[in-house]
Amino acid sequence: MASTGTTNAPEGTGLVGGWARAHPVRAVAAAMILVSLVWRAQLASRGYLAVDDYMLIARAAEADLTPGFLLTLYNNHFMPAALLITWLVTRAVGLAYWPYVLILTAAQAVLAVSFARLLRTLVRPGWALLVPLAVFLFSPLTLEATSWWAVGVNMLPMQIAMVLAVSAQVRYVRSGRRRHLVTLGLAVLLGLLFFEKALLVVPLVFLLTTFLFVGGPPVRAVLTTVRRYWPSWLVLTALSLGFLALYGSRAESSLRRPDSLGEVFSFLWQLLGSTVVPGLLGGPWRWLPAGDGAPVTAPPELGRWIAWVAFLVLVVLTVRLRRVAGRAWLLLASYLTLVTALLAATRLGSIYSDVAGAVPRYVSDVVVVAALCIGVALLGLRPVPDRFAPADPPRADPGDDPQPATGNGNGDGDGDAERTDGEPATATDGEPVRAATGSAGAHDEDPEIATVEQVTPDVERPADSEPAPRVAVPAAAHGVIHAEYDDYDLRPPVRPPAARPFDAPPQRAGAAAGSTPPTATGAPPPTAAPVRADRAEDATRAATPAVRPTGEPEQPAVPAASTGGHDPEDPAPPAVLVRHREAVSAGLAIALVAGGLGTAWTTARFGDEWAVKAGRTYLDTVRAELAAAPPGTVFFDQPVPGDVVPALSAPYNRQSKFFRALPERPVFVTEAEAPSLFDRTGRITPVRIDGPTAQPGPEQACGWKVTDGEAVRMPLTGPRDDWFWVVRIGYLSSGDSTATFRFGGREKRFPVKTGLNQTFFEFTGGGDTVELSVADPDVTLCTNEVAVGSPVPQQ
């Protein structure tokens, strides 16, 4: 009878404690995910909104929720889902940061759990699985995506789409079930709704399938990938063409040409040498501030070279130890080439080209691929039967009862094996063949990886006796026996053996490695699935438990193919590693500790830089000033400080747009008698005009006398270009009337009041002389204060 996957925990031990004891690797992985979420949420909360965040919020505050708004490009980016979320948050809470931190943390949680599940599906189980998980969870290259809303709202959904799409493709490759194609298409669509760069998921899925699941020379591998898994490419091609048609109808070309070949080499060295490689190994250890935005990488020279040496050592060792490692690194190199080419084509030749290679957010999606490739290189692919491999006839001894042949043994997440016709395979009693393994673990592991249960033939036995036990026999893939050992329990429950770093649990001492289960007739049972005889016989016998006289199976030994996670087709470890295993293990431990400490240092320094936010200080001051301002205070519209929103972001760097999401937003006018301004710190001050003034008038105690309805020409102390200006006129009037101001061929009418007054108004014009007239000939206006220039805070 198959195990239920439960473990008898000691009294007083809770469910969580018992689960952690039974599944230590998964327990540590869950703890790592929790730590990363709490740590990054705390780091993000130290900062605030930055640069593009204000523009996204301002656009959401001024727009209605319409298809036109959602389908509008932002900086040439197609991101309707991101605009929708921003609009909803803005309308709910206004100009606030905490909702975005919660959303980013929730998205990070979904991504982390999805990635951990993908790792368990793709690579062999073992403690070394925690290494790629740690790289993914804690890489400094993804700090921007978990802290900065404008980055995270694009990159986190794209990374989720990458993980879900790869997971769906892996399941489709292994099971052939078409329902995984639906998940594949929906995953890519999810990413495209947030970021057009998610189109890179399409070549990623193709490259991963070619490199990791199809063998042979490159050309043959590509052709086989296209022919064998054409339904995937049909779905992805249709999605891609539809999206490109929609995006192309709205976007402007953002392709640029680099100014020189030296600019290209400098970019490549900066991207690979300062950002990607150090970032994957815990760097860059030092950051260069970039205003309110996230800092850019600036690793020390020594750290850069140490990172490169460590990375090359990792590549060489894994390639030497695993056949699939070379393909994994080629997959990473191929995807990194795509990202680099796209980045170079859109960033070089611009004002940002000098730092384009030092911006981590441009390559944060590479971390997903890098972590997967590191996992494959360290552990190897998780063993599964190849549903495209030709089936060999089963080995059977004379006199055995024939057993029904099973299919390819590829599970689908439903706990059943699958025949070549897509229907669940069944044993002699009609029960679906279950995925099984040869050691202790959990029943709830993803059963995509299946072996085939072996059933002893029915013989005469007492009516009250136990049925013959089902015995797990690993299926073969390319002639290699693959046994799973971290996922399922076989009764009776036993404590799983302690696992070593980078190894699977060692073989249980005293296991009947060479025995086969006897039957009632004394003959060994036949296998229920085709197994390659030339390589599988010994391993099959090692994985087959002996049956006690009571009918209860003993705990099987771990097959050699699973011990240490070593595939017989992998090359033998170098002799120097075998002879100095303890020294090598110590060196690996030191390297992991050093990488962890470096990551902690880099993350802490990023947090220090991210916590410095001029925008938060500016907004806090503005809120306090508005609360204390007298009723009727009005403002002239001015740009916010450049360190909060740069001038290149115009018109969304204007205060009238910047403050639009505030519930107590200020009132902006174009004409007033006593307008105010926000200075660079956010304080409210009266307005002063910085610019040329009218030369003193000829009339004693009056200056320029404007009367009898005639226009008076007043030369300025300096010329003004034709531009947007603010005019201030201080005057003394004998009565109420309307005056007309002319400058550069344009005019402006404004009311005048009896007595000493002033007026400010916006005006567009240019020249070196202004004219002023009063409509009522009986009203006399005296002025010696006419200024044309820019409004500035009064000192």
Image (cartoon, rainbow, N blue to C red):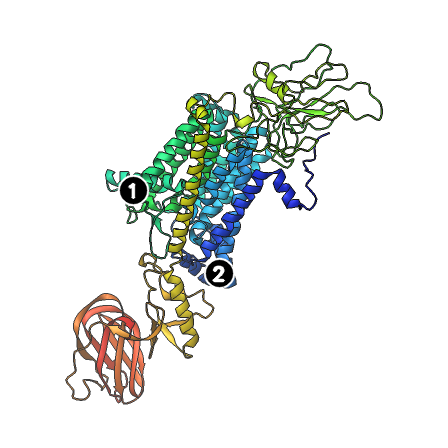
Residue count near mark 1 (Cα–Cα under 10 Å), binned few <14, some 14–19, many ≥20: few
Residue 468 falls left or right of residue 618: right
Residue 473 falls left or right of residue 164: right
Residue 58 seen from this side? yes
Residue 736 falls left or right of residue 214: left
Identify which residue, 385 or 341, lies in the foreground.
385
Residue 692 falls left or right of residue 308: left
Using the image, determine if residue 148 lies above or below residue 188: below
Using the image, determine if residue 563 lies above or below residue 39: above
What secondary structure is found at the residue carrying circle 2?
A: helix
> Mark 1 or mark 2, which has the lower sequence index?
2
- Report the amino acid beneath label 1: Glu
Rendered image quadrant of residue 459: top right
- Report the amino acid beneath label 2: Thr
Residue count near mark 2 (Cα–Cα under 10 Å), binned few <14, some 14–19, many ≥20: many
> Which disc number belongs to residue 398?
none
Query: Which residue is pictured at 54% across the width and 42% down the height?
Result: 29
Using the image, determine if residue 690 lies above or below residue 106: below
Query: Which residue is pictured at 82% across the width and 20% down the height?
Result: 461
The residue beneath circle 1 is 301
Identify which residue, 501 or 683, lies in the foreground.
501
- Residue 374, image x, y percentages: 45, 34
- Residue 757, image x, y percentages: 29, 84
The residue beneath circle 2 is 90
Query: Which residue is pictured at 59% across the width and 23% down the height?
Result: 559
What secondary structure is found at the residue carrying circle 1?
A: helix
Quadrant that contains the C terminus: bottom left
C-beta proximity under 8 Å, tags 1 and 2: no
- Measure how far apart labels 1 and 2 are at the Cα level: 44 Å
Rendered image quadrant of residue 207: top left
- Residue 388, image x, y percentages: 56, 22
